[in-house]
Image (cartoon, rainbow, N blue to C red):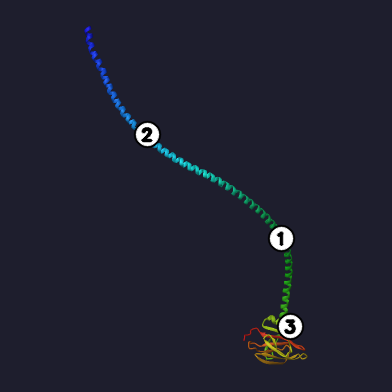
Amino acid sequence: MSNVTSVSTQPEKTNRWNMPTAAALALSVALAGGNAYLLVKTDRLETQMKELKAAFKTELVSVQQDVASRNTSYSKVTEDLRKQIEETGERSAMAANAASRANNAAKKYSDDLSKKFVEQQKMVNDQHQTLAAQLGEMKDASTQTYAKVDGLTSDVTNVRSEVASNKSELDKTIADLRSVRGDLGLQSGLIATNSKELAALRALGERDYFEFNLAKTKGPQRIGDVAVQLKKMDNRRNRYTIELIANDKRVEKKDRTVNEPVQFYMAKARVPYELVVNEVRKDSIVGYLAAPKVREAR
């Protein structure tokens, strides 16, 4: 039994020396590898830390510049806002003054309008009263006019009746007129023996008629476009003598009677003129000259 024990104990010592050495060696190798890895890792971390610091520094500078720029911008904005606030205050004051002036002007304008309205209303009332009075006067005048028109209508009716009566009388007078032979042996036109019959002849409009009252004078007198001079008259026998100046010639018509046509020609007429004496007085003769309507100018 002791042999068995000695044999088994020797190999056990050899194994105990080899195993720690291998373990130590392995541990050393492992530690060396781990240290190398840690060194590499550390270098990488340091490099990354440097890069991060540089990036951080760059970013910080950028942020600082941005902050400075923003501060400058904010300062400008703040200054602008301050100026705007000040200007707004000034504008507000100006606006308040303008509003006050506008309010005063509006009040004055309103007062003026009210005053003008009152004046115009008074004017309208006055005009209304005036028009009412004028309408009343026009109504009265219209009533009077209607009355006058009725009267005029009645007068017109009377005038028409009178005109009709006068026309009838005129027609009768014309019918009573006679035509006689003149001193030249020519049948005369209708002869008027008084003013009524002469008016009837004028109404016919066939000749121009010139009435005369011819006194005895030293020279001829104008009757129409003829010169006539009374030489003698005899009112008891109703006779007279005249001298005519016609066509630059003197022609005596001697011892003519009343209502006898004294006929003579003028160069500017194709039908004879006719002078008719209706009355022989002591100092004059009364009658008319009948001249043709159509007379040519010399």
C-alpha span from label 2 to label 1: 108 Å
What is the number of the mark on residue 53?
2
Q: Quadrant of residue 222?
A: bottom right
Label 2's element? helix
Q: Secondary structure at mark 1?
A: helix
Q: Mark 2 or 1 closer to N-term?
A: 2
- The percent coordinates of residue 199 (x first, y second) are 71, 81
Secondary structure of the residue carrying numbered label 3: helix
User: What percent of the width, then of the height, locates residue 193?
Assistant: 73, 85
Which image quadrant: the N terminus? top left
The x and y percentages for residue 171 are 71, 80
Of residues 164 and 66, the one nearer the viewer is 66
The label nearer to you, 2 versus 1, is 2
Between 204 and 273, the one lying in front of the other is: 273
Earlier residue among tags 3 and 1: 1
Which residue sits at x=73%, y=74%?
A: 159
Q: Residues within 10 Å of mark 2 (few under 14, many from 20)?
A: few
Label 1 packing within 10 angstroms: few (<14), some (14-19), many (20+)? few
User: CB atoms at circles 3 and 2 under 8 Å apart?
Assistant: no
The residue carrying mark 3 is 195
Quarter-of-image position of residue 216: bottom right
Identified at 52% across, 43% down, the residue is 82
What residue is disc 1 on?
Answer: 130
| Relative to 23, residue 53 above or below | below
Q: Amino acid at mark 2?
A: Lys
* Mark 1 residue type: Thr
Q: Choose mark 3 or mark 1, whichever is in front.
A: 1
Residue 285 is left or right of residue 66, and the answer is right
